[in-house]
Image: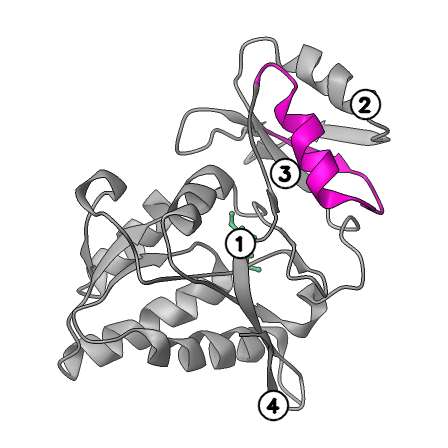
Amino acid sequence: MHSADDIKKMVGTYAAQFVEQNAVIGLGTGSTVYWLLQALGTRIQQGLRFTAVPTSTQTHTIGTALGIQFRELNEVDELSVTIDGADEADPQLQLIKGGGGALLQEKMVAAASKKLIIIADHTKVVAQLGKFPLPVEVIPFGWKQVQKHIAQLGCEKIVLRVKNNDTYITDNHNYILDCWFDAIGDAAALNAALHNIPGVVETGLFINMAKEVIAGYPDGRIVTIGG
Ligand code: 5RP
């Protein structure tokens, strides 16, 4: 049986094969993507050349140390593929993302990509989205008003994200509200409703974006959903 970290390493390493010579790609954020970056570092030593747009300062820092050449999103036109993690993925490949706080840049980079591949351990594959608290990025100004509006959408618990005893600040200098919806019936409608609230910058709902989810299991299986 593989541990949770072994599974992340297995799928992260597996996904490195999807980066082609001279490709321009997007690189996601998180502990599963960490292993993808490590595997890409090894492939660079073996001669692979590619350019990547990072979705966070975390990925930029880890990747730079491994020899990955980064560009800003404004410096590229289209990305052939983005490989990223997720917090939940349902059978329609709708996602909750943003557990690592990088949802805004992750969504922008995914939207610039021909293909979004998600790498995850089996616990992220769910029948219905919503058990994982949905991250919503908001501007700091008046965030309590935004919290009130989100509650009116039927959300029972909304918590301002804190890290190391301080309010968590995203790479784009915003706050994150983690929203416990429990069960999200219509993810597209919820995403639209959240975007209608003044002060919401982005939501962690990724609708019709992922083309495939590569999930790793404790028995060593790697299962691809979609594709
Ligand atoms: C960061 C994300 C991550 O991809 C998501 O939280 C999954 O991370 P991990 O692979 O560490 O479980 O959306 O904003």
Ligand 1 image position (quadrant): bottom right
Write down the quadrant of residue 197 in the picture: top right
In the image, what residue type sits under mark 1?
A: Met
Where 47 sits versus 148, above or below? below
Q: How crowded is the residue under tag 4: few (<14 C-alpha within 10 Å), some, or many (20+)?
A: some
Sequence-wise first label, 1 or 4: 1
Query: Label 1, on which residue?
Result: 209
Sequence-wise first label, 2 or 4: 2
Write down the quadrant of residue 220 in the picture: bottom right
Cβ atoms at labels 3 and 4 below 8 Å apart: no
- What is the span of residues highlighted in magenta in the rendered image? 176-199
User: Which callout, 1 or 3, points to the residue nearer the camera?
Assistant: 1
Query: Label 4, on which residue?
Result: 220
In the image, what residue type sits under mark 4?
A: Gly
In the image, what residue type sits under mark 2?
A: Ala
Q: Residue at x 67, y 36 (%)?
A: 191
From the viewer's perspective, is 90 left or right of 209? right
Sequence-wise first label, 3 or 4: 3
For the residue with label 3, is its CB less than 8 Å from the closest atom of ligand 1? yes
Query: Label 3, on which residue?
Result: 135
Q: Secondary structure at mark 2?
A: helix
Mark on residue 151? 2
Q: Secondary structure at mark 3?
A: strand
